[in-house]
């Protein structure tokens, strides 16, 4: 039998100097990363988001765990798809395994968890635990709800409104973060496209110069083939110019 939930929470809170109240909060992956760091002291903690709030952030944290398992040749499957859903039983079983692994491998050196994560906030998202299912009014029952626990004054709209407001704020924050990520990808795309365009112009100029001298360079020809190659199914956009027929505008 593994340790109880309360024992595991007490252990992980003491080891990492955090304040988790539920096993489900380990589903962010952050605690698992730092448990490994306490053993090996070489987890890239700058890549670990201690206060992750979205599933894609949880998955990024688990990627760090997976890389460490691979580097240390730890033969243990990580059910990432289940763990990131922040269900109690899945995370309880994995945390029990992590505790046994830590007991076996921790070398006993001093460990400062706050310094290792450079003071990152460890506040876990309040919406990790699944919300209780909402009950709906039965038709013809005069507004009575299944279970018979509707307040005399009717359902409390305020609590539902607060949940909806929190959900909207979370979506807005996620959208803002994704927009910033998209902007970075667009800048990276433009950067590399400009480099390829410079190479294309240089190769074209050199090829034309050799053609005037009735010479040919196979390497330049191969480079042009790579630059102008397309994937299957790709069509040149309407109004596009076929390779070799370009008109430069300076």
Image (cartoon, helix red, strand yellow):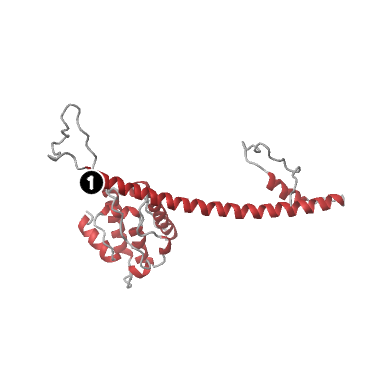
Q: Say whether residue 13 is left or right of residue 120.
A: left
Q: Residue at x 68, y 52 (%)?
A: 197
Q: Nearer the viewer, residue 52 or 106?
A: 52
Q: Nearer the viewer, residue 242 or 81?
A: 242
Which residue of the protein is positioned furthest toward the top in this rendering? 140
> Could you tell me residue 15's position as x and y percent?
28, 66
Which residue of the protein is positioned furthest toward the bottom in this rendering? 110
Residue 130 visible in image: no
Q: Residue at x 77, y 50 (%)?
A: 218
Q: Nearer the viewer, residue 72 or 149?
A: 149
> Could you tell me residue 88's position as x and y percent?
26, 49
From the image, tell me which residue sits under label 1: 159
Q: Say whether residue 26 is left or right of residue 224.
A: left
Which residue of the protein is positioned furthest toward the right in this rendering? 213
Q: Say whether residue 231 is left or right of residue 225.
A: left
> Could you tell me residue 146's position as x and y percent?
17, 34
Residue 190 visible in image: yes
Residue 6 occupies quadrant: bottom left
> Could you tell me residue 27's position as x and y percent?
32, 52
- Graded by Cα atoms within 10 Å as few (under 14), some (14 to 19) or many (20 or more), the crowding at tag 1 reads few
Secondary element type, mark 1: helix
Can you say whether 249 is above or below 151 in the image? below
Q: Say whether residue 76 is left or right of residue 203.
A: left
Residue 95 occupies quadrant: bottom left
């Amino acid at each position: 039998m593994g340790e109880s939930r309360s024992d595991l929470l007490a252990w992980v809170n003491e080891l990492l100097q955090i304040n988790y109240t539920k096993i489900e909060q380990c589903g962010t992956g952050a605690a698992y990363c730092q448990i490994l760091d306490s053993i090996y002291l070489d987890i890239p903690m700058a890549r670990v988001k201690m206060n992750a709030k979205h599933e894609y952030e949880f998955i990024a944290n688990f990627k760090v765990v997976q890389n460490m398992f691979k580097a240390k040749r730890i033969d243990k499957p990580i059910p990432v798809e289940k763990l990131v859903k922040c269900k109690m039983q899945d995370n309880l079983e994995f945390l029990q395994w992590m505790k046994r692994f830590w007991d076996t491998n921790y070398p006993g050196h001093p460990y400062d968890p706050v310094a290792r994560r450079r003071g990152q906030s460890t506040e876990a998202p309040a919406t990790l635990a699944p919300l209780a299912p909402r009950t709906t009014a039965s038709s013809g029952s005069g507004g009575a709800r299944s279970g018979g626990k509707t307040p005399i004054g009717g359902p409390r709209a305020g609590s539902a409104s607060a949940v909806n407001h929190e959900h909207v704020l979370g979506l807005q924050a996620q959208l803002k973060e994704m927009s910033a990520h998209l902007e970075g990808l667009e800048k990276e795309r433009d950067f590399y496209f400009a480099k390829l365009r410079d190479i294309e112009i240089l190769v074209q100029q050199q090829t034309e110069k050799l053609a005037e001298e009735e010479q040919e360079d196979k390497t330049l020809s191969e480079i042009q083939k790579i630059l102008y190659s397309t994937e299957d199914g790709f069509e040149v956009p309407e109004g596009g110019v076929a390779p070799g027929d370009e008109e430069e505008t300076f």
